[in-house]
Image (cartoon, rainbow, N blue to C red):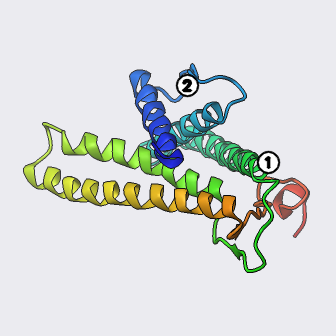
Amino acid sequence: MTFANKCFDIFAKTTADYHIADNIDAPFANPYDKGSIEHVLAEKNYVDAVQWHLEDIIRDENIDPVAALALKRRIDRSNQVRTDMVEDIDTYFRSKYADVTPLPDARINTESPAWALDRLSILALKIYHMRVEVGRDDASPAHRAKCQAKLDVLLEQRADLTQAIDFLLDDIAAGRVRMKVYRQMKMYNDPETNPVLYGGK
């Protein structure tokens, strides 16, 4: 099994594990060894799963405004955690390929390996939830058919994205792609760069 497919299996298992309790406040018992890349990937997907459901909850038109604001703050914190975790995963790849000398004509990829894995984690959540919609007994045949068509596309995306990630890692290992990471440097969560937080006009 390729590395990207192993990652997808971790994401799919973690997504399924979240739905055992199906609770945004439930603790996560990570089954992988602490310090391993598998552990980090599982943690990343669990954060994604929780945020997926936070995004569902906040869209309730009858939600209490105070509760909605608290959820928005929680989503903001979660987004920062997700970004930090992606950067930690890219640090793993930079270390793994530190001894690779890029070829003179080495390319720069449009996204780093970790940001591609971030997309794969979200894709695992989309596939899980679309399968739920396909299997809903209380939904119309038309709804289930529409969701099945979407699921087919998502499964095709999974095949394409896992292959693309494996190609990217092969290219980095061979020096055909330069491993280069730009930090996100998000400004809105930083009290030193958000004018509202530091009192600027």
Report the residue at 14% width, 44% height from top. Answer: 139
Residue 174 lies, in percent from the top left, at 67, 63
Q: Which residue type carries mark 2?
A: Asp
Report the residue at 64% width, 66% height from top. Answer: 111
Q: Which is closer to the viewer, label 1 or label 2? A: 1
Q: Residue furthest bottom?
A: 105
The answer to whether the residue labelled 1 contacts the one labelled 2, judged by CB atoms less than 8 Å apart, is: no
Residue 107 lies, in percent from the top left, at 69, 76
- In the figure, is residue 189 to the left or right of 10? right
Q: Which residue type carries mark 1?
A: Ser
Dot 1, crowdedness within 10 Å: few (<14), some or many (≥20)? few
Tell me the tag on residue 148. none
Residue 168 lies, in percent from the top left, at 59, 62
Residue pointed to by mark 2: 25
- In the figure, is residue 26 to the left or right of 19? right
Name the secondary structure under disc 2.
loop
**Residue 102 sits above or below residue 121 on the image:** below
Residue 79 lies, in percent from the top left, at 65, 48
Tell me the tag on residue 95. 1
Identify which residue, 102 or 160, lies in the foreground.
102
Name the secondary structure under disc 1.
helix
Report the residue at 51% width, 48% height from top. Answer: 4
Report the residue at 13% width, 36% height from top. Answer: 137
Identify which residue, 180 or 86, lies in the foreground.
180
Q: Quadrant of residue 175?
A: bottom right
